[in-house]
Amino acid sequence: MQYDFLEQSTRLLREAGRICQIDPNVMAFLAAPARVVIFRIPLKMDDGSFRVFDAYRVRYNDALGPTRDGTRISADLDLGEVKSLALIMSIKHAAGRIPAGGGKGGVSANPRELSKREFETLCRTYIRQLRPRGHAYDVPGADIGTDLQSMSWMLDEYESITGYHDPAAINDKPPILGGSLGGYEATGRGVFDVFEEAAKATGFEIKDASVAIQGFGQVGSVAASMFHEAGCRVVAVSDSRGGLYAKEGLDIPGLLAHKQATGKVADFADSQPLTGQDLLECDCDVLVPAAVQGVITADTAYRIKAQMLVEAANAPTTVEAEAILLERGITIVPDVLANAGSVHLCQMERSQGLADNYWDIETINHLRHQRLVAGYRAAMNAAAKYQLKSVRLGAWINALKRIEEAMQMRGWC
């Protein structure tokens, strides 16, 4: 059966709302996004041909503050995916006590099929057609298919339209343009921060633990380095072009150099090949899905051997799979906590940009760690209060309670 990202997300929303008895009027408002923008981008290609790309921006709920983040550019992007991601972003912000609502957007396009000029034009036109209103309304950030350069183009386009500098209007830009230090590493480092706290809470021994990571891009590669430096054995990794396994652990610094040189993890020395699906089911203590949503299903859940699942990707585990894994006694560190390092970094980036006062990396790392750990502890406490096995539901409950309070104080319900 095809994975329905939006249906899965709304099921979590309804279940968390039911458990903690959220105001029905709040739940009715959260049943769909507050605002959806759909538009099309015409683009003249380098060869003189003409293409049209579908584009989206969803502002799910702004009761807690201006919506923000992610701009995803991928070939199979559709409106349902963007709505789901905007909902999850609302939960991440609220669960992390960040004064922001959830926003998400993107373009249905394959960046690899575009020249640099075509891609720059696409990014700039996205901002121009979106007609953004600045840092107090909705703030686009980076996601799959976008990076420091993409966000630099978007910021420049926005400032060219408005005629004034506003670094807080676009997130995930480089420090030279008013971005924050630590942006590239924020999500991957945050994955380890939350894992470490979960390990303490459950008595899990980190030293020499075996770790498998599905996805070796920006998030997965940084997380791999953190696990490796902590004394774990990263025994398996994979990317879109294949995977590999080494029982005694992979040389992560060497693998990073190999990936940089070849563009893939496959064919690395002293390892054996395996597929991304095989990685999910390999013999390991910690499994880190860091690629895409919906990879751990009810069928897969019975074959997972890990003691702990740390969700570095958004929604990698289905609702049905989570129930099975929890029943089997597997600890799940959920996505809205585990991969929230970037949303905390974006909040810090916003604060620095508005104040025109930029912090050192030690301050940023300390604050990110402190806020992520606090969010995980709060979710655990909520789960315990409602006698739940699921820390995920604990996080969603905390988030919904904050959104409910904000909406009630505003007189929306």
Image (cartoon, rainbow, N blue to C red):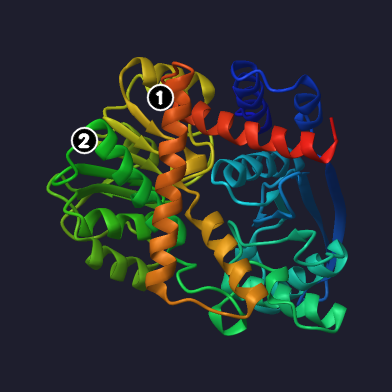
- Which of the marked residues, 2 or 1, is nearer the chain's N terminus? 2
Where is 83 relative to 130, above or below?
Answer: above
From this view, report whether residue 329 is shown above or below residue 32. Answer: above
What mark, if any, has residue 204 been given in the picture?
2
Instruction: Name above or below for residue 182 compared with residue 413.
Output: below
Tell me what residue is drawn at x 70 percent, y 51 percent.
Answer: 104
Q: Nearer the viewer, mark 2 or mark 1?
A: 2
Instruction: Identify residue type, mark 2.
Output: Phe
Q: Position of residue 406 (x, y in %)?
A: 73, 40
Residue at the spot 35% in from the left edge and 73% down from the top edge: 261
Q: Which residue is mark 1?
A: 300
Q: Is residue 381 visible?
A: yes
Q: Is the residue marked by circle 1 packed among few (<14), some (14-19), or many (20+) residues within 10 Å?
A: some
Q: Is residue 38 left or right of residue 318?
A: right
- Please name whichever residue, 71 or 338, is drawn nearer the observer in this view of the structure: 338
Q: Which amino acid does the dot numbered 1 rest on?
A: Thr
- Furthest-front residue in this view: 409
CA–CA distance between discs 2 and 1? 23 Å
Of 410 and 81, the residue lying toward us: 410
- Describe residue 249's horizontal placement relative to residue 141 as left or right: left
